[in-house]
Image (tube, rainbow, N blue to C red):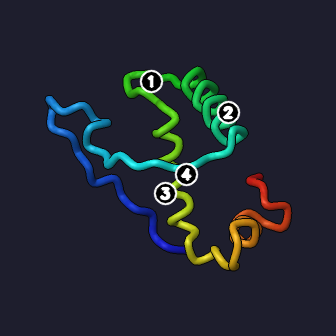
Amino acid sequence: MTESVPMTNKPDDDTPRYLTFVRTEARLTPEQVAAIAALRRRVAANRQDKAERITDNTLLRLAVDLLLANADRIKGDTEAEMRRALLGEEGTAH
């Protein structure tokens, strides 16, 4: 397993945190978009400290960190093969 990528972008006191990130685009399925939004709502509702805003992008950054931490498990020639190698035979997260 590879090391997790530490968060190095520390915003100045006056800079909104989201402006310290690089804007990028990803193509997701409608089911992925709905699932991320539902997860965000659940996570946000269950937090004790609500000082930091949790967004869909927050969860996507966590997912990227998790993917990179498990990069050595990714094998295959197609998205489906790589998904199975990463997530198991069913190809879904547990």
Which circle marks residue 49 in the picture? 1
Q: Which residue is mark 2?
A: 34
Q: Regarding mark 4 in the picture, which secondary structure is present there? A: helix
Which circle marks residue 65 in the picture? 3
Is disc 4 surrounded by few (<14), some (14 to 19) or many (20+) residues within 10 Å?
A: few
**Can you tell which of label 1 and label 4 is closer to the viewer?**
4
Amino acid type at circle 4 is: Ala
Instruction: Give whichever of discs 1 and 2 has the lower sequence position.
Output: 2
Marks 1 and 2: CB-CB under 8 Å? Answer: no
Amino acid type at circle 2 is: Ala
Which circle marks residue 63 in the picture? 4
Which residue shows up at 27% across the image and 54% down it?
8
Which circle marks residue 31 in the picture? none
Instruction: Give whichever of discs 3 and 2 has the lower sequence position.
Output: 2
Is disc 2 surrounded by few (<14), some (14 to 19) or many (20+) residues within 10 Å?
A: few
Examine the rendered structure and indicate whether residue 52 appears above or below residue 22.
above
Relative placement, left or right, of 27 versus 49 is right
Relative placement, left or right, of 68 versus 36 is left
Examine the rendered structure and indicate whether residue 1 appears above or below residue 15.
below
